[in-house]
Image (tube, rainbow, N blue to C red):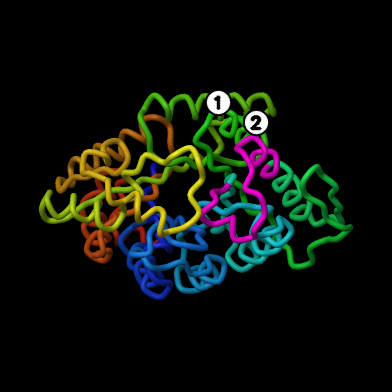
Amino acid sequence: MPEVGYSAALEQFGPNELLTWCQEAEKAGFSGAMASDHFQPWTPEQGNSPFVWSWMGALGATTQHMDFGPGVTTASYRYHPAILAQASATLEKMFPGRYWLGIGTGEALNEHVMADYWPETPIRLERMIESIELIKQLLSGKKARYHGKYIKMESVRLYSLPETPPPIYIAASGPKTAETAGRMVDGLITPAAAPDKLKMLLANFEKGAREAGKDPAKMRKLLQLHVSWADTYEQAVENAVKEWPNGGMNFPKQDIRTPEDFAAMAKIVRPEDFKGRVFISTNLDEHCQHLQSFFDLGFDAVYVHNVGRDQSRFIRVYGEHVIPALTGKTAQTQTAQ
């Protein structure tokens, strides 16, 4: 059955208010929460970047059944992968069956704080692969050591382990990373894009899975979707431009390192730049159709981020109109599970 999750934008909102909204989202029928892992917001005006690992512990303790995970974190820069393995083991042990680890190759905005050279995409992919290998070794419970090209770890083991390791999903926006996800881990995460691109990513994901002897139909495929819903179309457009200008940016080839540089780029963002990136509509039936298009492609769950500030109202109207239309679940049936 398709799932509609809530995308918790920690770069846009504070940790306490997002906890409250996730509790509201669970009661409204949202299946889970995808939490952004940022050291800095995209623009200074967004104004937040709480530590996602502390926040997820609080999220698990204050909700009952929603799944959750970082969407996504980056191993081997800000965090040594052994620390991510330890954090993930603890969250899965505390909240069995609810936590998943989302990993990506990273971006300079968050990872350059380590003051190391920010490498090109192929090197970042190699580092991600090494990180996942190390994490999987530690989550097995056996003593492990690792000596890769980029990452090293002395002989060590984890002691506080869950009964079953949490699933690992790779975030991919290109064919090679999608194929790596199918081959190495349990699922795929990707942002919303044009149908042809998403079909390509899913095909490569399935190719990697089959080559590894796995059934891709049994592996999770998660999509993150940014929308702008408001009472009027003019307000929805204004929310996108003001609150989430990064959603309309053509990112330059060089990696941007500061929110101030993103803010400078935001000055040239126009409403037409959001087409195909942020779904802007006041019509809830159109929201249903848009989300359904991703389920029709083969995604299992769509985690939705409304870029406006009135999150409680967005959660309520999605719980009343969109989620029941797509999943058949009302807030009452979801809460009773």
61 over 105 or under it: above or below: below
- Does residue 77 appear to the left or right of 34 in the view shown? right
Residue under the point 39% across and 55% down: 7
Residue found at the far right of this picture: 155
Front-most of residues 60 and 104 = 104
Residue holding disc 2: 214
User: In which quadrant will I find the N terminus?
Assistant: top left
Asked which quadrant contains residue 163, the reply is bottom right
Query: Which mark, residue 204?
Result: 1
User: Is 115 included in the stretch rendered in magenta?
Assistant: yes
Asked which quadrant contains residue 166, the reply is bottom right
Local packing at callout 2 (Cα closer than 10 Å; few below 14, some 14-19, many 20+) is some
The range drawn in magenta is 106-128
Q: What main secondary structure does the magenta stretch of the protein show?
A: helix
Expressed as whole percent of the image width and height from the top left, the position of residue 321 reads 21, 51
> Mark 1: which amino acid?
Asn
Asked which quadrant contains residue 239, the reply is bottom left
- Does residue 19 appear to the left or right of 275 in the view shown? right
Residue under the point 43% across and 61% down: 41
Expressed as whole percent of the image width and height from the top left, the position of residue 128 reads 67, 44
User: Is 32 included in the stretch rendered in magenta?
Assistant: no
> Mark 2: which amino acid?
Lys
Front-most of residues 138 and 141 = 138
User: In which quadrant will I find the C terminus?
Assistant: bottom left
Kind of element beneath mark 1 = helix
Residue under the point 49% across and 29% down: 202
Front-most of residues 202 and 26 = 202
32 over 288 or under it: above or below: below
Front-most of residues 181 and 74 = 74
Mark positioned earlier in the residue sequence (1 or 2): 1
Expressed as whole percent of the image width and height from the top left, the position of residue 330 reads 28, 55
Q: Nearer the viewer, mark 1 or mark 2?
A: 1
